[in-house]
Structures are given as C-alpha cells and as structure tokens.
Amino acid sequence: MRLPRWLARFNRKVTNRILIRLANRPPYCALRHIGRSSGIEHRTPLNSFPDGHRFVFALTYGPSADWVQNVLSSGTAVLEYGGDEIRLTSPRLISKAEAWPVLPRIARLALGVLRTGDFLAMDAPARSQDRP
C-alpha cells in the first residue's frame, strides 16, 4: 500500500522541514538530488539501510515519487549519512524479497504494516573514496 499523495504534499511542506534536522543521525539521512525538470538541487529526508557497498531505501510513496524519478533519471545522488557525504550511483528498483533481509526488524514491522513493496538500491564507493 502506497501512502496517499496528499500526505506526500503535506510531508514535503511541513514534516520534511522538521525531519531534515535529523539527517545526520542514522538511520536518518538526507539525499541530495537534482530535479529532472528544474535542474534545482533538492534535499530529501529519508531512512537508509546500509548493506555492504550499497544503501537501500524503502519507497513508501512508490517508485513514482519525485525524488525517486529524479535519482533514476540522473543516475546519481549524494547521501548525507552519519556526518559523511557519500556519492551514490547506479540507482535501481529492487524487490521486497531482495530488500527485506537488509532491514532491521523494527523497519520490517513498520513497512509490513504499511504494506510497502517498493525499494531502491544505490551503490556506494569504497570507504576511502566516499567524498564527492
């Protein structure tokens, strides 16, 4: 079940402005991406789940969310995570079966209640090359 679009609009205008302050406290992060039409840099607060040299993101608004489409279109984004800036590449939609083992139990419970089935994975470089 994807969350309703009205909630996405509310979150963009209100909730995200509060949550962005938590961006450097994992699992919270901020994902910087370029708007595909506007060319403007956006900063979206998210939960991220590291898995080796990649990060997984739950798409609670589905794969058609603006930030997802921006990242898929550009092929890159910068993740602000735990005080670091990590350039992510190779965005791809992944299945729930592939994402589920990466998620902590509490996240699986919450996303299960929301019936979230869409996920995005992006690759991170080796730790010595993280800085953009």
Image (cartoon, rainbow, N blue to C red):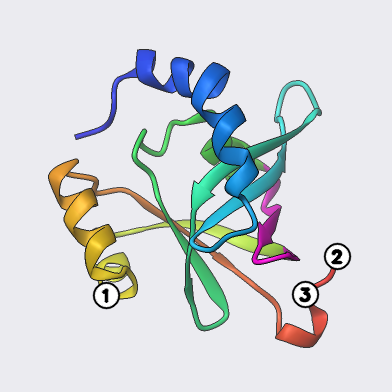
Give the residue at mark 2: 132
Cα–Cα span, label 3 and label 2: 6 Å
Question: What's the amino acid at mark 2?
Answer: Pro
Could you tell me which residue is drawn at 70 percent across and 30 percent down?
A: 36
Q: Looking at the image, which is closer to me, 67 or 20?
A: 20
Which secondary structure dominates the residues rendered in magenta? Answer: strand
* Label ID, residue 130: 3
Could you tell me which residue is drawn at 65 percent across and 57 percent down?
A: 24
Q: What element carries label 1?
A: helix
The reply to whether the magenta stretch includes residue 76 is yes
Could you tell me which residue is drawn at 37 percent across and 19 percent down?
A: 7
For marks 1 and 2, the one nearer the N-term is 1
Could you tell me which residue is drawn at 63 percent across and 48 percent down?
A: 30
Vertical arrangement, residue 34 with respect to residue 31, above or below:
above
Q: In which quarter of the image is the N terminus?
A: top left
Vertical arrangement, residue 77 with respect to residue 68, above or below:
below
- The reply, left or right, for residue 30 in relation to residue 12 is right
Vertical arrangement, residue 102 with respect to residue 11, above or below:
below
- The reply, left or right, for residue 58 in relation to residue 65 is left
The reply to whether the magenta stretch includes residue 101 is no
**Quarter of the figure with residue 25:** bottom right
